[in-house]
Amino acid sequence: MLKHLALFVGGTLFGTAGIKILSSRDAKKVYTHCTAAALRAKDAVMDQATILQENCSDIYAEAKLINEERAKQDADAEFADATPADAEA
């Protein structure tokens, strides 16, 4: 019984000391610096995502142009392949 009481008291003291340490001014500085670093990392990721999105938009637009040009070439080739007999019918 005394052992359990000693463990309880020790745990309570350790927990109280831990809370004081975690809420100290130095700990708050560490938390602040870590949060600032996380915000900088978020900004860097968002910048890269914006660049990637712009590149994807450019690629999509160019791909549409390529397909439009191919469709036009196919239509021109089909028209050129038509024989005069096909045109009369």
Image: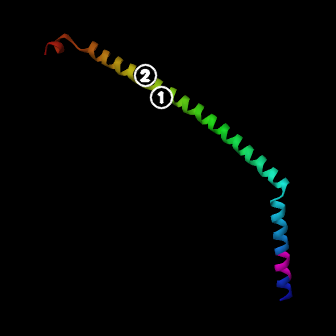
Please say whether residue 10 is one of the residues in the magenta stretch.
yes
Left or right: 65 with respect to 88? right
Please say whether residue 54 is one of the residues in the magenta stretch.
no
Amino acid, disc 2: Leu
Amino acid, disc 1: Tyr
* 70 or 45, nearer to the observer: 45
Q: Which of marks 1 and 2 is nearer the N terminus?
A: 1
34 up-or-down from 75: above or below: below
Q: In which quarter of the image is the N terminus?
A: bottom right
- Residue underneath mark 2: 65
Q: How many labels does the image show?
A: 2
Distance from the alpha carbon under mark 1 to that under mark 2: 9 Å
Q: What element carries label 2?
A: helix
- Residue underneath mark 1: 60
20 up-or-down from 5: above or below: above
32 up-or-down from 67: above or below: below
User: Magenta residues?
Assistant: 6-11
Q: Where is residue 68 in the image (x, y as percent from the top left)?
A: 38, 22
Q: Give the main secondary structure of the magenta stretch.
A: helix
Q: Which residue is at a point 55% across and 29% down the rendered structure image?
A: 54
